[in-house]
Image: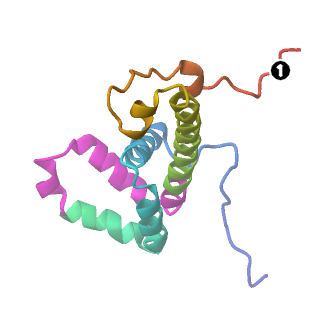
Amino acid sequence: MSLFKSNMNLPDPEKPALPEEEDAVLEKLAKKVVEWKMSVPAILFLESVKPLNFIGSQTMVFFEPIVQAVFNIRDYDTFRCALEKRETIEILLLKIESLDAVALSRDKRIKKFMKVEKKKWKWYQRYLGVFLPKVTIPDDVLNPPDDTTDTT
């Protein structure tokens, strides 16, 4: 008889950690956070409250009648159920970080394109900001093709 013998079930690496509807709600939340450019405060907050995720889900149960009048209750309930699992906060953090990295690289490409484009402007357009030309950003700057595909 061993002291440490127990029925400890380790998670299956091929099985997704969350059901697809909970994953969709987390993806939606991560997109909103990145869209509002609140990635850093959200990551800081989530890292600080990571041990309290179950308490947070139970607090959401307490406030459910109030929130029910304002928000979509289905997404709220799905998010509350997802928070009951310990790995949810880490998954949400990874989603926010990956979407933020994509948005940051997109912003850098747009900034680089605009720097080249502004060199074509007249001096009064560049320095005074009057009679600015209409600039359309090409699709290859907004959504570059994947470099992972091999054409050979």
Give the residue displayed 59% in from the left and 43% down from the top: 16
- For residue 150, side relative to residue 34 (left or right): right
Give the residue displayed 18% in from the left and 62% down from the top: 63
Q: Look at the image and tell me in which quarter the N terminus lies.
A: bottom right
| Percent x, y of residue 41 | 41, 63
Q: Look at the image and tell me in which quarter the C terminus lies.
A: top right
- For residue 75, side relative to residue 111 (left or right): left
- Which residue range is magenta in the image? 63-91
- For residue 10, side relative to residue 149 (left or right): left
As rendered, which of 83 and 92 lies closer to the eye? 92
- For residue 1, side relative to residue 17 (left or right): right
In magenta stretch: residue 137 = no
| Percent x, y of residue 31 | 42, 42
| Residue bearing the label numbered 1 | 150
Q: Secondary structure at mark 1?
A: loop
Give the residue displayed 39% in from the left and 55% down from the top: 38
Outermost residue toward the bottom? Answer: 3
